[in-house]
Structure formats: structure tokens, C-alpha cells
Image (cartoon, rainbow, N blue to C red):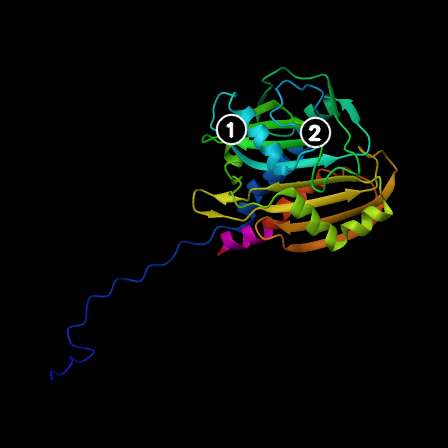
Amino acid sequence: MSTPPAWNENPPPYPTPQVPPPARSPRSWLIPLAVIVVIVVVLIAALIATGVVRLGPSSSNAAYETFSQAEGVAAGNSGAVTGGPWFAVFGAGVATPTAVLEPVSNLTSLLATIDCTITWPHGQPSNLDVPSTPSNAATGTAAYWTFGFKNASNVLLIETVSLGSPTALLVANGTACENVVAYLAPFPSAVLDSPEIVSDANSAGGSTFLATYPNATRAWGAIGGIQFGTIASTSPVWEVTYTSCSFPAYSGETGATFNATIAGLTGVVSNSSTHSGACGVTVPSTLIAAVHGVLPALAARKAI
């Protein structure tokens, strides 16, 4: 039997230790992510303030659709918009007890806060509305949905689906705009549909809230995640919001709101709460809260 060589016999050359570059400050990563939050505000403004222009033919027989049904309708309609293929990165539905009508200026004033070039494929509508959804509509369905799609160049397309009928509402591009849209991750195929998500939220306190406020405005929305290049990406996040506030809320109004944050792949409710106080623009918080939920984790990851 041969004797193994001593550990110090003919040692291999050891590489010079490499010092990792200094970590980037968390603040520098929070800046573009904060801009994403602003974009989500504007996109959800489209949800709460559009729909009177119903230009696309309906490809669904259901007036009140789930997330997956409405997303399929919007995706089919997006094929007619130059620049595709388009990939869904967020979606939100709103169910109001009565129809809502408001001027388009409420939307354009928010669009002005984003450094994007906005075009309206079918012209800018003058009046905007959201149709009502009856309280006995199936769980997780809504009369009105808004979806954000992006293409390979990170141009953003906003599609609405109103009572099953899709419309390409607006296209947003420009260098600064596209740099931010690049952080939005497309939905994976395994993302849970709205009926399951809403059922999970109801089990976590939503049903009790709706029993107390049967005429509440209900909204649910999700983001596909936040990504860094083609490697790192967070999982989808859902947010469910119910509010007794009028829609839109008026100055001086008070009311109650229920919120639940839910993992988009597992249905696990990570947070739920009910609170009362002054009414604000409550429905847009559906996705803003979802984005805020991933900011701390992303900042920590990028600080390492």
C-alpha cells in the first residue's frame, strides 16, 4: 500500500484573495423602486378612472371576470398593439356597488408626475367610468380590470377590460420610463387566480368586514414581482382591499378599510388588518402596498 503524500508536499498555487467590490448603498436601490411605486399609482388611476371607451370586441361571455379570465382577454387584445409580444406585469380589479364617472383630467394630472412619453392608441377619452359589480357576483370577479404589459424594450402598455370588453388605453415609453419598467417582472404561469386569493383574504377577516359593510368597494390586484436583470426576481404578491369610503373618496369623509397581503404562489396571508379613519385614495393602495411589501427585502438583498 502506498503512503499518501504529506499535506505540505507540492502544494498547489493558491490564487490571490479577491476583495469584493463595496456594496451599493440601499438608498440607491430604493430610488428606482420608489419610482415604481409612483408608476403603480398612475396605473391604478387607470383602474379607478377609465372604461367609458370600450373599443375592442369582447372575447369573453362573462361580464364579471376573474383575474385569469380578464388577463386572457387583455392579452389577446394587446396583440393588435405595435411593439409586442407583450407580457403582463400587474393587474387589478375593482368591484364597486355603483358606477363611477369622473373627468379624464384626474388621470392625466397623475400621468404628468411620471417621466414617460404617453400615447393614446384610440385617442384620449374625455369622460371615464367604472361600471358597477353586484355584491352577488362570484367571489374574486369584477366588472372592471386594468393590466400593465411590457415588451422586450420595457415599453409599458395599459389595457383595461370593462364588462368583458378590452381596450388598449395608453402606451408609455422613454428612456427614464423604460429604465423603471425594467424592474417589473412578468407573472409566472403558477400565479394564483383571484377567486382563491379573495377567499384567503375573506378567511383572514374580509368576510367579517363585508358583513359589517355590505356596500363596501372591493379591489384586488397583484404584481408579477420585482426583478434585477434576468436573474433575481421576487415572487408575485397580491393585495386585497375593502373600504366603506365612497369611491372616489371626498374631502372630510371617514370610513373603515380592510387590507390583506397574500403570497401570489402559495396563498399564504402574510398580513391582514382593519382600521378606521379619514378616507383617502384607498383603492390604489391595492398595488402600492404590494410594492411596498417587497422594498425592504430588495434593499437588504442589494446591500449585501
Q: Nearer the viewer, residue 265 or 13?
A: 265
In screen coordinates, is 221 left or right of 6? right
As drawn, is 17 to the left or to the right of 220? left
> Is 270 colored magenta in this rendering?
no
Q: Residue furthest left?
A: 2
Amino acid, disc 1: Val
Quarter of the view holding residue 116:
top right
Residue 298 in the magenta stretch? The answer is yes
Residue 192: tell me if it is visible: yes
The answer to which image quadrant residue 35 occupies is top right
- Give the secondary structure at mark 1: loop
Q: In the image, what residue occupies the spot 60% across and 28% down?
A: 158
Residue behind mark 2? 63
| Magenta region, residue range | 296-303
On the image, numbered disc 1 is attached to which residue? 155
- The image position of residue 73, as x and y in percent, is 59, 29
Q: Residues within 10 Å of mark 1 (few under 14, many from 20)?
A: many
Quadrant of the image occupied by residue 43: top right
- Expressed as whole percent of the image width and height from the top left, the position of residue 300 reads 54, 55
Towards the viewer: 150 or 269: 269
Residue type beneath disc 2:
Ala
Q: Residue furthest top?
A: 123
Instruction: Note whether 124 is above or below 282 in the view shown.
Output: above
Q: Secondary structure under badge 2?
A: loop
Q: Going from the N terminus, do you reach mark 1 or mark 2 first? A: 2
Q: Which residue corresponds to the image point at 61% horizontal and 20% vertical from the top-left?
A: 57
Pick the front one: 33 or 216: 216
Badge 2: how crowded within 10 Å, few (<14), some, or many (20+)? some
